[in-house]
Image: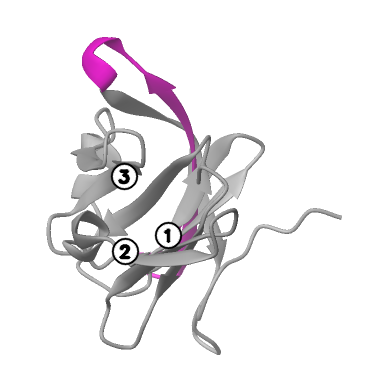
Amino acid sequence: MEDKIYMKDFNNNTFIYEPKESKWELDEMLNSNHWNGACVVDNVLYYYDVFKKKLLAYDPNQRCWKVVKGLEELLSTMRCSWGFHTVSYCGKLVLFFRKMGIWCAEISLSRRQGGEIWGKVQWCDFVIDDGKFGMVTCLDVTV
């Protein structure tokens, strides 16, 4: 995001490294949420908040968190679990979650007037029985 490096320490503090200036800074706004399992799509950080049952977006230009709208039906069916991961895929967001196995939802994102971010579920389906393993992390890889 904005050619900077974002890092979290074990105490959940967020630090931003500015390579051009060789400078580290603490970011209080990013510290306000536990953005585990997050990803970046179009310079915006996304993660699923298990307590609020909402997909949240952090825009580094506006330095604020926003709720992604349009996903209420999908997110209302999810149980509170730590098994949520987001991945950037071809300009879209992919959300992996547990619901009697591991499920996957591909979500397209758009900005509307006033800076609102809206998501639209392109597809959602069961992908694998998680009886023998659990997700630790998800990564997007470009080859």
Q: Which residue is mark 1?
A: 38
Which residue appears at 62% of the width and 64% of the height? 139
Measured along the vertical axis of the image, is residue 53 above or below residue 6?
Answer: above
Q: Secondary structure at mark 1?
A: loop
Q: Is residue 95 visible?
A: no
Label 2: how many Cα within 10 Å (few below 14, some 14–19, many 20+): many
State left or right for residue 64 relative to residue 38. Answer: left
Q: Secondary structure at mark 2?
A: loop
Verify whether residue 17 appears in magenta.
Answer: no
Q: Which residue is mark 3?
A: 58
Which residue appears at 32% of the width and 69% of the height? 14
Which mark sits nearer the N-terminus, 1 or 3?
1
Report the span colored magenta.
96-115
Label 1: how many Cα within 10 Å (few below 14, some 14–19, many 20+): many
Q: Position of residue 75 (x, y in %)?
A: 25, 47
State left or right for residue 46 relative to residue 39. Answer: left
Which mark sits nearer the N-terminus, 3 or 2?
2
Farthest-out residue, left: 52
Q: Are marks 2 and 1 in contact (CB under 8 Å)?
A: yes
Q: Quadrant of residue 31?
A: bottom left
Principal secondary structure, stretch drawn in magenta: strand
Q: Nearer the viewer, residue 45 or 15?
A: 15
Residue type pointed to by label 2: Trp
